[in-house]
Amino acid sequence: MYKLAYYPTEESMSHSFGIYDRREGALKKSEIRRNYIIFILGGILFGTVSSVLNVFLAEGYEFTQTEKIVIPAVIMLISVLLFLGFGYMNAKKRERQSQIIGINIVRTGFDQKTPKNIEFFEDRLVYTSPYKSYTEYYDEIDYVVSDSICFTFVCNNSGMFFSIPKDGQDADALFGVDRLLREKFGESFIYEMEGAANA
């Protein structure tokens, strides 16, 4: 059995929410629909520009071989740049949302002056604070992401995640927890450290 004591931090909670959103939000139907809409609009844009060019060109005008290559290439390049720009803005928006939600979770839901405790047993973990105790069995947790900032536990059935910061923890205790979680979760233990990941 291992026991960790920690204070919830805005940084770790924002970080964990970002992990949860990246892994669980990427396949949301709304995201998929949005991507399809972008590609459809790109196709409509391509067809519209081609039609407009044909209307304004002199009657009987024929595209040269160079124009047949350059014009579609330019249109496609503009479409790709628009798509990449949208993707970048969307990623930044989600990053800001993660930070805001993480901060709000800590500010509205936690007493930051009192340490929280989490105990790891063979079949479950138990979270305790002065106000409550919460038990989560390992078979109810879908996966764990471990990186340099925290452990992030994701439970899809309950639609929740929780974060355990690593900052300030005893190195031996962290090593023991890491080994226990690897053993219990196998391939569902996702290790992300300095850009390296096992899943």
Image (cartoon, rainbow, N blue to C red):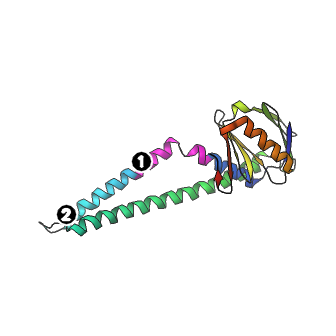
Q: Position of residue 172 (x, y in %)?
A: 86, 48
Q: Does label 1 or label 2 sit earlier along the sequence?
A: 1
Main secondary-structure element of the magenta-colored stretch: helix
Q: Is residue 183 left or right of residue 35?
A: right
Q: Indicate the quadrant where residue 53 lies.
A: bottom left
Residue 118 drawn above or below residue 45: above
User: Image point 49% across, 44% down: which residue?
Assistant: 30
Answer with the quarter of the image where residue 176 lies. top right
Quick check: marks 1 and 2 in contact, CB under 8 Å? Answer: no
Where does the image place residue 37, in percent across and percent down from the top left?
41, 49
Which of the pair 3/59 is nearer the observer? 3
Q: Residue at x 65, y 56 (%)?
A: 195
Q: Residues within 10 Å of mark 1 (few under 14, many from 20)?
A: few
Q: Which residue is mark 1?
A: 36
Compared with 131, 192 (above or below) is below
Q: Where is residue 16 drawn, in percent x and y?
A: 69, 49
Residue beneath disc 2: 55
Q: Which residues are magenta?
A: 21-38
Callout in the foreground (1, 2): 1
Could you tell me which residue is drawn at 84 percent across and 48 percent down?
A: 6
Tell me the kind of residue under disc 2: Val
Quarter of the picture containing the C terminus is top right
Q: Amino acid at mark 1?
A: Tyr
Q: Is residue 157 magenta?
A: no
* Residue 78 percent across, percent down from the top left: 38, 64
- Label 1 element class: helix
Residue 36 on the magenta segment: yes
